[in-house]
Image: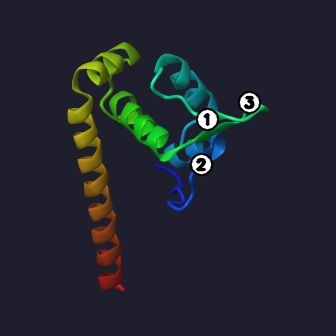
Amino acid sequence: MGTTLDENKMYYTMKEVAAHFDVNTSLIRFWEKEFPTLNPYRNKKGTRYYTKADIDIFKTIYYLVKEKGYTLQGAKEILAANKSKIDKQVKMRESLLKIRTFLLNLKSELDQ
């Protein structure tokens, strides 16, 4: 994934979300149309603002489509059938990635 998101913010712009997941903004707009659960707040000008809940939904969709290789239809079916199971897998993967990053940083410090 790309950049990290500031945990203290309530809302994130589309540009921030796209940079975090290292995808184009057009993909985010497309997935909004395909997955009705992904529903960001829009101001009067139409600018999209994503909450942490929206980011979690996007994280799950990203995991299914980009990392596991599901089609959009397959991802929709899995989300409808086993959302809690998939959410656990995504959180577990995220925790493991944090541990991996920590261990790699520790190894580089020890090598110095």
Q: Secondary structure at mark 2?
A: loop
Residue 76 sits in which quadrant?
A: top left
Residue 87 sits in which quadrant?
A: top left
Front residue of this view, candidates 64 and 7: 7
Q: Decide which of tag 2 and tag 1 comes sooner along the chain.
A: 2
Q: Residue at x 37, y 13 (%)?
A: 73
Q: Decide which of tag 2 and tag 3 comes sooner along the chain.
A: 2
Query: Rounded to the nearest whole Å, what is the CA distance between mark 3 and mark 1?
Result: 9 Å
* Disc 3 and disc 1 in contact, CB within 8 angstroms: no
Q: Residue furthest right?
A: 45
- The answer to whether residue 13 is above or below residue 80 is below
Query: Rounded to the nearest whole Å, what is the CA distance between mark 2 and mark 3?
Result: 14 Å
Can you give x and y, in whole percent of width and height, for residue 92 in the image?
23, 49
Q: In the image, which disc is placed on residue 41?
A: 1
Front residue of this view, candidates 28 and 9: 9
Tell me which amino acid carries mark 2.
Answer: Tyr
Read off the residue under disc 2.
11
Query: Rounded to the nearest whole Å, what is the CA distance between mark 2 and mark 1?
Result: 9 Å
Q: In the image, which disc is placed on residue 46?
A: 3
* Disc 2 and disc 3 in contact, CB within 8 angstroms: no
Tell me which amino acid carries mark 1.
Answer: Tyr
Q: Secondary structure at mark 3?
A: loop
- The answer to whether residue 105 is above or below residue 30 is below
